[in-house]
Amino acid sequence: MSISHFSIPRPSDRLDDIPGYGRGRAGQTVSFRHRLGSNEAPDAPSPSVQAAVAAAFAGVNRYPDLRGETLSEALVRRHGLSPDAVAVGAGSIVILDQLIRAWCDPGDEVVTPWRSYEAYPILAALAGARMVEVPLDGSARLDPAKLLAAVGPRCRVVLICNPNNPTGTALSEDAIDALLASLPQDVLVILDEAYADYAGDAADVAARLARRLSRHANLAVLRTFSKAWGLAGMRVGYCLADPRIIAAVHAVQPPFPLPTPALAAALASLAEPEAVAARVATNATERARLSDGLVKTGLPVADSAANFIWLPVGDDAERLTAHLAAAGIAVRCFAGEGVRITTGTAVDTDAVLGAAAGWDARNLRAGSGQNKGS
Ligand SMILES: *Cc1c(COP(=O)(O)O)cnc(C)c1O
């Protein structure tokens, strides 16, 4: 469609200067053999998950659950919480948007460690809130003292991604508990745990979460089926929190947040936790191989507790991204900062390590030998 010469009614000023989402993939014309740019699971859903989706599809002439109740019930059972302590949505990013809009008025502040997930500033800006970015420390980790110092009178939300995207770094569970205890009770603390499944033992993570929620009424924990649960394309996420926080999410959220096939896929995958355990184990193996191999070629790699690694190569980010793209490997480029590479299959790891060996040689030939960052 061509653009008409008539002007359109002007949208809100809030939309001015909002950064675009998903730059890493925008304008991509080649199709990549190795899709390591979006932290997805490399394997297809199991036959039983696919069968559940097919069965649910036969009934899509009917509306789904009003609030995703069938999935919510299974989730509170899994996490040992009361039935009104969960809200589900079409991806945890949608629930994050709903939380920020429910808590922030224009001019309010969202405090977050930075660099972190690129969706955060977009969602804050859409709510008219001001993003207060607290620099990570020298090891690309959240700095609790600096974060606390940044919480001022206009702060309504503290947003913490742990493990952090795109750096993969994680604060220990004890450090998170200490931070939660020192943050003011009148501030909503959102803990984005999209990658928590990769960071620790599943059973223990679940128990710790219930304990934490019982101690901190101002805490909202976000989880997703998009990563270790392997369902990024189905768009299923959830929030665990005090029922009064959940009620606020429901006040902002339109009805029928999840289509019937997405509910069925999530329910069927919850019945197969061993598939998640297998993905987490494969990820640990391939992540170690990828990190060790890249460190040997002289590239800097941050400690990762997630399904990706962060290479703080600074000004070399775009060149390294292009070099990997030439080998059929898609990664996420943060220009001037670094490159994030998702852990994939053993074949993906071999491809990255093969291409990285060539990067070293190219670099030496170009005479720039030195990589930035540490
Ligand atoms: C991938 C990711 C999510 C998941 O988003 P969904 O909307 O559930 O797919 C949330 N937070 C972070 C930091 C992520 O990297």
Image (cartoon, rainbow, N blue to C red):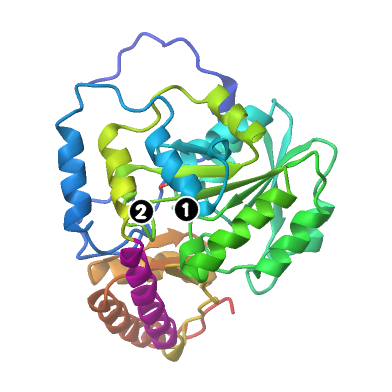
Q: Residue at x 22, y 77 (%)?
A: 347
Query: What type is the residue that disc 2 sits on?
Result: Leu
Q: Residue at x 56, y 35 (%)?
A: 84
**Mark 1 residue element:** helix
Per the image, is 274 magenta? Answer: yes
Seen in the image, is 163 located left or right of residue 341?
right
Residue range (magenta)? 273-294
The image quarter in which residue 48 lies: bottom left
Q: Residue at x 74, y 32 (%)?
A: 108
- The quarter of the image holding the N terminus is top left
Asked if the residues shown at circle 2 and circle 1 are in contact, with their CB atoms under 8 angstroms apart, the answer is yes
Other residues around mark 2 within 10 Å, as few (<14) / some (14–19) / many (≥20): some
Please tell me whether residue 19 is drawn above or below residue 163 in the rendered image: above
Residue 218 in view, yes or no: yes
Residue 343 in view, yes or no: no
Could you say where residue 95 lies in the image, as x and y percent from the top left? 51, 37
| Main SS, magenta residues | helix
Could you say where residue 213 lies in the image, as x and y percent from the top left? 66, 50
- The quarter of the image holding the C terminus is bottom right
Seen in the image, is 57 located left or right of residue 63?
left
Seen in the image, is 345 located left or right of residue 221?
left
Residue with the mark numbered 2 = 270
Residue nearest the observer in this picture, 40 or 230: 230
Residue with the mark numbered 1 = 78
Please tell me whether residue 356 is drawn above or below residue 53 in the rendered image: below
